[in-house]
Image: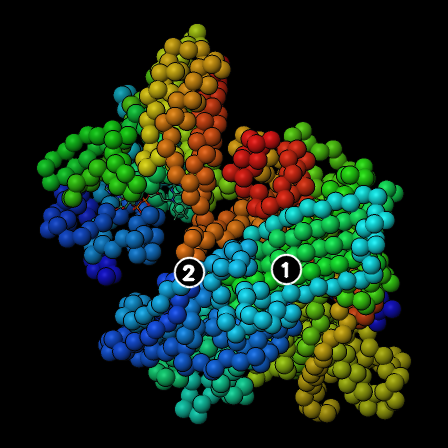
Amino acid sequence: MNAYQEFRMIGSRPVRPDGLDKVTGRARYGADLNMQGQLYGHVVRSPHAHAVIRSIDCSKALAMEGVLAVMTGQDLVEPGNQMLGSGEGAMALKDVVPMVMSQGKVLFHSQAVAAVAATSPELAAQAAQAVEVVYDVLPAVTDVHKALAADAPILHDDRFPDGYPEEPTNLATHISLTVGDPDAAFEKAEVVIEQNYSVPMCHQGYIEPHACVARADAAGRVELWCCTQGHFTVRHYTSAVTGIDLGKIKVTASEIGGGFGGKTTVYLEPLAVILAQKSGRPVKMVMDRGDVFRATGPAPGAETKVKLGATRDGKLIAADVECLMDSGAYNGNPAGIPAFMATACYKLTDARSTGRSVYTNKPKIHAYRAPSIPQVTLGFELAITELAAELGMDPIEFRLLNAVEEGDANMMGAPYNRIGLRECLEVARNHAHYKSAVAEGAGRGVAMGYWINAGMQSSATLNVIADGHVAILTGSPDIGGSRASMALMASEVLGIPFEHIHPKVAATDAVGHTDLTGGSRTTLATGQAVIQAAEQCVAEMCRRAAAEWDVEAGVVTWSQGAAHYGDQSLTFEELASRAGAMGGPLTFSSSLTSTSTAPGFGVHICDAEVDKETGRTTITRYTAIQDAGKAIHPDYVEGQMQGGAVQGIGWALNEEYLYNADGVLENPGFLDYRIPVASDLPFIDAVIVEVPNPLHPFGVKGVGEVPIVPPMPAIAEAVYQSTGVRFRDLPLNPPKIVAALASN
Amino acid sequence: MAVQEFISPTSLSEAQQAVSDGAVSSWLAGGTDLLVGIRLGARDPARVVDLKQIPELTAIEIDDASVRIGAAASAFDVLHNSDVPSLFPGLAEALDLIGSTQIQGRCSAGGNLCNASPAADSIPALIANGAQCRILGPDGERMLAVEDFVVGPNQNALAPGELLVELILPRPTAGTSDSYLRLTPRTEMDIAVAGAGVSITVDESGNCAAARVAIGAVAPTALLVDAAAEALVGSQLDQAAIDAAVEAVRAAAAPISDKRGTAEYRTHVVGVLVTRALAKAQDRITEARS
Ligand SMILES: Cc1cc2nc3c(=O)[nH]c(=O)nc-3n(C[C@H](O)[C@H](O)[C@H](O)COP(=O)(O)OP(=O)(O)OC[C@H]3O[C@@H](n4cnc5c(N)ncnc54)[C@H](O)[C@@H]3O)c2cc1C
């Protein structure tokens, strides 16, 4: 039962508080920050994908007029096995440090090997060229199968995954889980299918490149301004990578132009800090687009083998999933999630799932919106669709027969609470899109998706201003409209107008610890902290009103933004303006580790038409249906659903990392790394389903990640329906489609 | 090296003067190739000479015999000219494919041609329309057909100090129309995997009296495919003639396999584009007659 049942503000669509600054260009993003006397940092990057660094000589660069500092990997801490937790994707220090700057060995092209700081960007670029690095070049391997072959160059000679203790291999992780007895269940199955599917490595494609400014003082204190999904995470990682005490670092988050998981770590920040310390001047660093593609963490490519068994009457009874993922040069732990979550949408008591990840000479992979789940879901959902076809069943009916509901468990063991998957499937089945006839020559696909959703730590501080306005400070960078949601939630509890609430993203020294904006957790968890702080405010205001009226606090009620007892009332504004005389400033803080999280589910319907002569696919109609628990600001829930669907469309059709034989990325820019443009897309119809999360006061569930999960299998099925040819390897770009149609 | 000098001449003679000392200079029309090239380090001029302040270079003039488009006239100005888009709908299609509205406000057909990318969109359309280049240099003026202007990937026939002044297109005769189509994976903001520009003249009896077929992005330079034109001229543009033209362009195509598409795909799809471009030009002629 949710604490709040009826809403005055929640579910409305006011203009976001940060909107005006964004549309007028006043909002300050990472690269918009400048400090007096700042230097410009430039990174020296490896021209080789695999090499041992013999020597680095920075003396010529440092001798140049206007060059004030140089650094190499020697200036970072010696990396060890210490884990850096950050919820989604905890990582070992030894997997973070070399993504900032390599130490002795280069494992991917464009890996940072040194950096310089100079008085102008041009000079810094010239100085970077004057840094002399001698490499012993080694053969590079970019393909996961070649990396596992006996004669493969070994990237790490000190890593032995569990179960492989004899000699080092490129196998990074191997996780296998079994529930029930899948082999016996396959014996009983009347229909079995088994297929292989693959998805290429791709990039999050956030529009804003990484950027920061750092300043250091003589007392050893450091300040950083940067675009990030989590400035507390930046503080933590920067401390771990540089050895500077956590307490001496302050980080302020700028506005952010997208992250999608890619801005949940550090790349430039520790370098700018060290260069600032060495030079005594502020140092600004901005990554260019090419380096964003070449040297930050993309999403892993994956191959998935799926075997499913069902009875003739449509009951899914056995599953076996094997997912092989590309980890890039260091361990990004991509294999655990598919192993644990591949089957999460289905009632399955007998299943096995295996995840393996492999080192290759590419940048270490990083989180991308529902990390690793879209890749394995492509295989699982397409196999489900193929199985439904084999059984002669409607794809939604088949899913309804087998979809999880409250009380069912997935491979992680714990039973689901109140989830909304079946409700989404019902909405899909009855939606005008699904009921409409498919256009001549087009095809239709349906798929569903799951994401676990995170809780983690959040804090909020609420300061009441004397005129009855309220400032809300949180530590969650606002990527998807969260300030608007925070203001709505506070407005709901306090009963004052939305416009009187001023939400801010506060620096690390101005608000309690807050984990990063990721895992679809901010509206849920930071929102909970805001709700609690607002509830404390209401309780204190009621207490003060009771004191004024000389009655018990418990008899005072709060509604419509005022305290009431009998026919007396004191408004929020009155209590705010008289705060000094009635007990002092009104400031409330709440910090929590949220345990209120609930998983998210969505169902997508896609119509696509393939031009059989050119192989071009046009998405002609698209509907995304998702359980949001309770949509705080529906615009931003729909925005998440639309954005996720669009990223899935891009990945399905054209996005792909293309490496040449030397391990050099051939398409490090938006011309040849083809994310969709607006004219490539139909209107994405977003249908919000609300099955309240019983653990959250407002019923909220995370919504940001689920929508990237169903698109790939939905689109691949639509393309099959349009062409009559099954495609199981993405992307479905025109040359691939033409070649397949020609050979059929 | 960074750019040391920026000069903005206001006449052709001043422009010639600006480069007479032989320093490494680049002409700047819209800059939508040049500035990108400088930023990427592919171009490194010490001096940049702006062409947009020279009246002849941004003018668009039309008389009974020809249409003259200043080499630095923006795509936007060409597309919004009162006559050019209806005289050469295919050339307009090509220019309208370049970049975005913002890019079109700056970029020019002359820059697209001089940049000489194998995938440039306006080049096949200019070739199909029989465009000629008026070139001015230290040794005076000369004329060159567009199909001879590009000599290799990103290489044009200009000698040091030479400048493309304008593009001269013969006015289409009655029963003539053109069309340009390209294939890109995306709808916009993309680069041609293959392109096809055609211009055909069809007489009252449906007979194809003249044809020019040009293809782009399937060879080091855009190609005028005479064999395709020969297959069409004298025919009723029937399936057999079109198939023969398609066969001719596929035979002429010499594409590479790269990140933008395989050679097989490009060869296949350029034929599809020629077929569709011919149908479109034919529809335009029929429409104009009715
Ligand atoms: C975002 C974006 C999208 C694009 N999309 C496309 C597209 O879809 N299709 C396409 O074909 N192109 C595209 N381009 C490339 C470019 O816009 C075109 O080639 C454009 O036509 C170039 O014209 P410009 O006037 O800007 O040339 P500039 O950059 O000014 O010049 C190009 C080159 O020609 C030289 N030059 C220019 N004028 C003369 C002259 N009169 N005499 C001698 N030399 C000269 C310059 O020195 C330079 O080397 C795109 C570019 C960008 C940035």
Residue A204: image location, x then y, percent: 55, 58
Residue A206: image location, x then y, percent: 52, 59
Chain at tag 2 = A
* Residue A626 vs residue B184, the one in the foreground: B184
Residue marked by disc 2:
A139
Question: Any mark on residue B26, and which?
Answer: none
Frontmost of labels 1 and 2 is 2
Picture quadrant where residue A294 is located? bottom left
Q: Quadrant of the N terminus of chain A?
A: bottom right
Q: Indicate whether B64 appears above or below A321.
A: above
* A621 with respect to A101 (left or right): right
- At label 1, the amino acid type is Ser
Residue B30: image location, x then y, percent: 32, 46
Picture quadrant where residue B3 is located? bottom left
* Residue B224 vs residue A177, the one in the foreground: A177
In space, the residues marked 1 and 2 are separated at their CA atoms by 28 Å
* Residue A511 vs residue A726, the one in the foreground: A726
- At label 2, the amino acid type is Pro
Residue B90: image location, x then y, percent: 41, 28
Chain at tag 1 = A
Q: Indicate whether A345 appears above or below B135.
A: below
Residue marked by disc 1:
A372
